[in-house]
Amino acid sequence: MGISGLLVRLGSIQRKNHIKEWNGTTVGIDAYSWLHKGVIGCAIELAQGKHTRGYVEYAMSRVHMLRHFGVTPYMVFDGDYLPSKSWTEAERERRRQERRAKGLELLKLRKMREAQEQLQKSIDVTPLMARHLIDECRRIGVECIVAPYEADAQLYYLEKTGIIHGIISEDSDLLAFGCKNLITKMDKFGGCYTIDRDDFTAIRGSGFSLSGWTDTEFRYMCILSGCDYLPNIPRLGLLGAYKLVKRHKTPERIIQSVRFDATKTVPVDYLDGFRRANLTFLHQWVFCPKAEKMVMVTEPDAVVDKQYLDGCGRELDAETARGIACGDLDPVTKKPFVLESIVESAIRSAWMKPKMRVLETSQSFTSISNFFSK
């Protein structure tokens, strides 16, 4: 979902760029974002139960393009369902089922354009579909890792620890985590836009300046405006959240102020939800490829109330965590994969999520192959 309106507010510091400027670096990729885009071109085939590898070809064309320009791709895949996103996942699955039913009905009526529009939004990317991409990446030596939970947190951790130097994603939630270098809107030729966190103080816009803001205040604004871990208060958007955080600073004072606003209704348990969302950004479980075990994005201090950490997931034993990260174990069931029909996987419930493998990074790259035609 991302933070609604955030990228627009950061428009003045988004720099038009080209991926070749990242030559010689390792860049983390939100692999599911490429799979979701790849599914768009073959949604009808998937919904009808036909075999297709269109989504794999789409993602691999981007992989080849990065390597052509001297960029080492590091593919990061989502893992298990995160407790903090239960409301988000349930709503997304409901909408997918509705759109699939409507799309198939439109297909029967031979209304192809309308059917395609509905079916493109109905296909969930499943672990098995991701596995096909993993296998193709492994074949050419592209490194991959499956997060125990969310790719966003895993990507931020990899950047924070210096394993990657930037992140390719369309998800503005990464900025709430603390991402330093976000590469967005990348096209098939390598054209893109970059957001450098160091430029936050240079934002120009009416009534919106982050000069003097801390990462904590920025995160509070993102949560208050509505994020994957907590829905926003009705009629409260990003600019309203910005003004509240700027004036009141702490969650307690912010929410108390909103309660006095007769035009807004604050859920009784909103403050608890806010605290949980904040800690999920700070302390979610990820996999450390160096230590080969799960760690928190940052370790909580002694004063953190443990009851608010339940949305961050749970720690798994090192062997299970390694199996998931390598793609040997299903991150949801924690059991070895049982291969099944790719089509059946694509149209079943969305509660199953990705699984992949840690691969060796290729030290050389070959000439680009046919990606301009993808």
Image (tube, grey):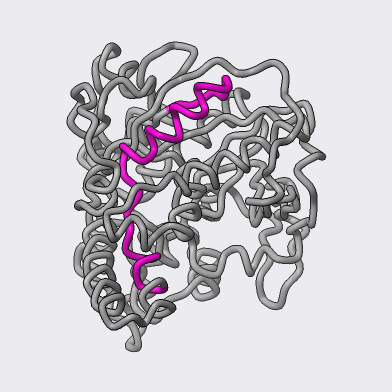
Horizontal placement of 109 versus 42: left or right? left
- Marks counted in the figure total 0
Identify the residue shown where x is 68% and y is 51%: 373
Q: 239 or 180: which is nearer to us?
A: 180
Q: Which residue is drawn at 34% across and 47% down?
A: 51
- Residue 265 visible in rendering: yes
Q: Is residue 2 left or right of residue 368?
A: left
Q: Which residue is drawn at 66% across and 60% down?
A: 210
Magenta stretch containing residue 126, yes or no? yes
Where residue 248 appears, as percent x and y from the top left, is 48, 65
Nearer to the camera, 274 or 169: 169
Q: Where is residue 190 in the image (x, y as percent from the top left)?
A: 73, 48
Q: Position of residue 27 (x, y in %)?
A: 64, 33
Residue 211 x/y as whole percent: 71, 58
Q: What stretch is highlighted in magenta?
A: 117-145
Residue 292 on the magenta span: no
Q: Quadrant of residue 12?
A: bottom right
Using the image as rendered, state which of residue 336 and residue 229 is in the foreground.
336
Quadrant assignment for the N terminus: bottom left
Name the side, left or right, on which 213 lies relative to 12.
left
Q: Residue at the location (28% across, 48% down)?
A: 343
Image height check: is 345 above or below 87? Answer: above
Please name whichever residue, 364 or 71, is drawn nearer the observer in this view of the structure. 364
Inspect this view and state whether residue 2 appears.
no
Q: In this view, does 307 lie above or below 203?
A: above
